Structures are given as structure tokens and as C-alpha cells.
Amino acid sequence: MNVAVRYYSRSGNTKLLAEAIAKGLNVQAISVDEEKSKITEETDILFVGGALYAYGLDKNLKRYLEEIEGSKIKRAVVFSTSWLSKHSVDLIKKALSQKGIEVEKEYCYYKNTPTEEQLKEAESFSKKFLGE
Ligand SMILES: Cc1cc2nc3c(=O)[nH]c(=O)nc-3n(C[C@H](O)[C@H](O)[C@H](O)COP(=O)(O)O)c2cc1C
């Protein structure tokens, strides 16, 4: 199964989550502002994460989602962090759906900086998709 993890994080919270998710999948978490973040191969599951800033997504993540090649991605799973609101989850899901990508209902979300225990949980969360 070909899986990938992409994220955008300003202050590191979502990055921690992305790395835990990637660890569970045995792949590397890549920030969307890196050149190599572009999905060029057929991907079975793309894990996409970002946080909420002033009730919206960061422009780097927005642009990445607008430019993503939907036909290359079979399915996507969303993860996010924020102070309180899960609106970021909905915004990412919506952007992916608009690209014709099937989005998993289940998502991974934590408030602020995930704890060690939550990072372990996130690792198990992603791992279970490999078994499906
Ligand atoms: C400028 C700014 C605006 C934010 N706006 C919101 C918001 O509207 N709602 C919310 O729940 N959290 C908000 N947050 C909190 C962030 O989503 C939260 O700290 C998140 O974990 C940051 O992720 P990052 O470390 O990956 O950048 C905001 C944070 C910043 C810095």
C-alpha cells in the first residue's frame, strides 16, 4: 500500500502529530512547503494535516490543497490541532472533497500540543489503516 503524510505547521503542534502518524506508517512526514511534498505517484491513502488560524487554514496548506492532483489519490485521512475548534478538520475535508478525493470520516485531532500519550494514540490511529 502506498501511503503519504503531508502537513503544514506554524509552531510545531501539527508537525508533532504528523510525525507520530508517519511513524505508525513507517514513512516520512513532509511539510507542504517542501518541494518534495508534491504527490506524483498513485497514492492509496494520503494523510493531510493542518491547524486553524483565525478560523481558517494557513495559505500554504490552502494552496497545496488547491493544486493537489485528485486523480492520483484514492483516499485521504485528515488530522489537525487547534485551541478549541475542529473547523480546520472540516475545511481540509472540504478542500479534498472538492478535488474528488474520498475522505475518511474518522480523523485525528488534539488540542494544542499533543501529549506523549496522544502521540502514541496517533501512531496507532494511522497504523490501523494499513491493515484495512
Ligand atoms: C494567529 C493564530 C490564530 C489562531 N486561531 C485559532 C482559532 O480561530 N481557533 C482555534 O481553535 N485555534 C486557533 N489558533 C490556535 C492554533 O490552531 C493551535 O495553536 C495549533 O495547535 C497550532 O498548530 P501549529 O503549531 O501546527 O501551527 C490560532 C493560533 C494562532 C497563532
Image (spheres, rainbow, N blue to C red):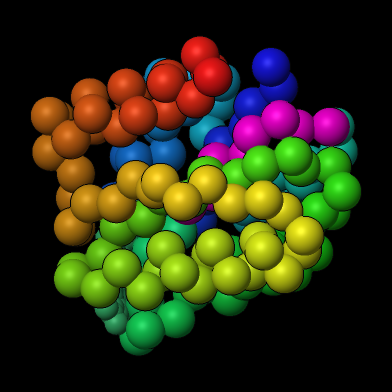
x then y, percent, for residue 68: 78, 57
The correct choice, above or below, for 99 with respect to 59 in the image is above
Give the residue displayed 19% in from the left and 69% down from the top: 83
Q: Nearer the viewer, residue 77 or 8?
A: 77
Q: Main secondary structure of the magenta part?
A: strand
x then y, percent, for residue 123: 33, 24
Give the residue displayed 77% in from the left and 63% down from the top: 99
x then y, percent, for residue 33: 63, 55
Q: Quadrant of residue 42?
A: top right
Ligand 1's quadrant:
bottom left
Give the residue displayed 69% in from the left and 17% down from the top: 1
Image quadrant occupied by the C terminus: top right
Give the residue displayed 18% in from the left and 71% down from the top: 84
Q: Is residue 61 left or right of residue 118?
A: right
Region rendered in magenta: 42-49
Q: Nearer the viewer, residue 93 or 19?
A: 93
Residue 31 seen anywhere in this rendered image of the structure: no
